[in-house]
Image (tube, helix red, strand yellow):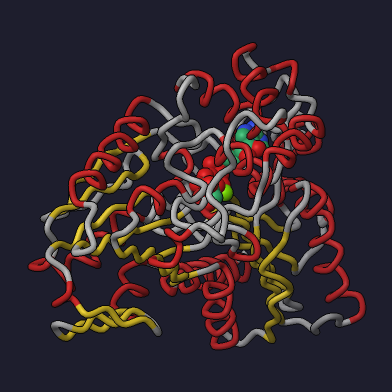
Amino acid sequence: MPNQKKIKKHLLEIFHTGLEAVKPTTIIPSSINFNYPLLKIEQQTFDLSLFKHIVVLGAGKASALMAQSLENILEGFITKGLISTKYGHSCNLKKIEIIEAGHPVPDQNSLLAGQKILKLINQYRSKHTLFIFLLSGGASSLMVLPQKNISLKEKQLITSLLLESGANINEINAIRKHLSAIKGGHLAKAIYPSTLVSLIISDVIGDKLDVIGSGPTTADSSTWQDCAFILDKYSLWDKLSSSLKSYFQEALKGHLSETPKSTDKCFQKVKNIILASNLKALLKAAHKAKQLGYKTIILTSSLQGEAKEAGKFLASIAKETLKSNHPLAPPCCLLCGGETTVHLTQKHGKGGRNQELALAFALEIQNLDHLYLLSAGTDGTDGPTDAAGAIVDGTTIPYASQKNIDGKKFLELHDSYNFFKAINTLLITGPTFTNVMDMQIIISTKED
Ligand SMILES: Nc1ncnc2c1ncn2[C@@H]1O[C@H](COP(=O)(O)OP(=O)(O)O)[C@@H](O)[C@H]1O
Ligand SMILES: O=C(O)[C@@H](CO)OP(=O)(O)O
Ligand SMILES: [Mg+2]
C-alpha cells in the first residue's frame, strides 16, 4: 500500500526532526557563546579569568555527546573531566574521561563513576574552580554513591522493585535521593564553595530540577516522610532487606539527616540551566508536520499514567478526527510527549512503555483505515529492549492474527516487544545521545 509507506516515512521524518532539536550537538552550540574571558550560557555569564581550573563532570545518557560538544567550544580551557554514560553511549573525547555504566539498574561501574567524580571534586574544590556538570536522564543509575551502611546490592534491589512497581519517576527518585551521598543535592554540597553550573537535558514531566537524574546539583524537595508514603503505596516494606528497612525506620525516627534543602548556602553558588526538554522536541516536530501538509496540534508534553490506558485514550482521540473532525480534520497530525508507566505483573514478557502503548492503540483501531501512530523513547531505548518503540496502524492487529499472533494476549503478558518483533514493525534507532522522555505522533489521513 503506497500511502501506508508514505505516512510511515512522514512519521519517521517528524520524529527525527524533533530529536534533532534536542541533541547536544544542536543545543550546546546554540546556547553557549564563548569569547574569552566571557562564557555566556543562555542568560548566565561567567568570567573565566576568575578561575584557575575548569572541571567538567557529568552523568546521563546524553552526557558523552554533551561533553564532546562542550569540548569543541572549551577544549583548551578544560583542566580535567569525567562523565558517566550508559553502555554503548560513548563518543570520542579529548580531555574528558568516560565511564560506561549500568542502566536502569546501577552496577559496579556506576559506583566507580560516583567514587571518581567525588575524588575529582575533592581534588579541585576551591573558589578558583568552575565545575560544569552535564546532566541528563539516566544519571540516577549511571552515577551512584550509596550512603554509609547501604550496599550497591541493596540499591540494585530497591531500584528494580521501584521500576516494576508502577511508581512514577518523582516517587522512584525521592527514594533514590534519600539513599545517595551524591544525588539529591549532595553533589552541589560537595562542590561548595566552588562555582557550579549544571547544563541539563530534561527527561521528566514538568522539568523538575530535583527529579531529573535525581537532582545532584539541586535542593531536594522530597522528604523521608515521602519515602515512607511511597514504600506504603507500592507495598514495598516487606520486600526490602532487613538492614534497608531499619535504615528507613531510623530516618523516620529523626536519626538521619535530610537531603540538602534550598536554604543550604551551597546552592547560592549553583546555576542550573535546562537546555532541552520534551516540549522543545515537540515544537520542532510540529513544525515539520506542518511542512509535510498536516494540520498539527500538540496535545500535551506531559502524558502520564498506565501506558496501555494512554494508548486507548490516544486511539479515542485519533478516531474522533475521522468521526467529527475534532480536535482537527484529517489530514492532521496529533503530537504528544511525556512518560507513561507500566505496572508489571510478576510473570511478564519483554517490552517497554512505548511498545505497550502502541499495542494498546493498535487494538483500538484494528481494521480502521487512515490512522497511524509512532510511539518511541527519544533516547532510542524503550524498556529493556533494543527497540525505541513501534509504528502501528489499522492493519497491525489483523496482520498479526493471520500469523496466529494474538495482540491482546501479548499485551496482557507485557510482551509487546515479541509481538512487534514477530510482525517486523519494531522501530529501531540505536542510541540517539539525547533523552527527553517519549514522543507519540499520530497521523490521521483520509487518503486511500
Ligand atoms: N515487559 C515490559 N513491558 C512494558 N514495560 C516494561 C517491560 N519491562 C520493563 N518495562 C518498563 O520499562 C521501564 C524502563 O524503561 P526505559 O526505557 O529504560 O526507561 P527510561 O528511558 O525512562 O530510563 C520501566 O519503568 C518498566 O516499567
Ligand atoms: O536518571 C533518572 O533519574 C531518570 C530521570 O531523569 O532518567 P531515566 O528514566 O532515563 O533513568
Ligand atoms: Mg525515564
Q: Which residue occupies 74% across, 24% down?
A: 236
- In this rendering, position of residue 242 left or right of residue 151: right
Farthest left residue in view: 76
Q: Nearer the viewer, residue 14 or 352?
A: 352
Q: Can residue 432 be seen here?
A: yes
- Residue 331 vertical placement versus 242 (above, below): below
- Residue 79 vertical placement versus 294 (above, below): above
The quadrant of the rendering that contains the N terminus is: bottom right
**Which quadrant holds residue 327?**
bottom right
- In this rendering, position of residue 292 left or right of residue 362: left
Q: Can residue 423 be seen here?
A: no
Query: Which percent across, then down, holds residue 426?
Result: 55, 46
Query: Which percent across, then down, holds residue 77?
Result: 11, 67
Q: Nearer the viewer, residue 296 or 103?
A: 103
The quadrant of the rendering that contains the C terminus is: bottom right
Q: Which residue occupies 57% across, 30% down?
A: 159
Query: Which percent across, then down, holds residue 436?
Result: 52, 61
- In this rendering, position of residue 6 left or right of residue 322: left
**Which quadrant holds residue 343?**
top right
Farthest right residue in view: 324
**Quarter of the image where ligand 1 sits:** top right
Farthest top residue in view: 242
Q: Which residue occupies 40% across, 65% down?
A: 270
**Which quadrant holds residue 251?**
top right
Q: Nearer the viewer, residue 14 or 345?
A: 345
Q: Which residue occupies 84% across, 59% down?
A: 313
Query: Which percent across, then down, holds residue 224?
Result: 68, 38
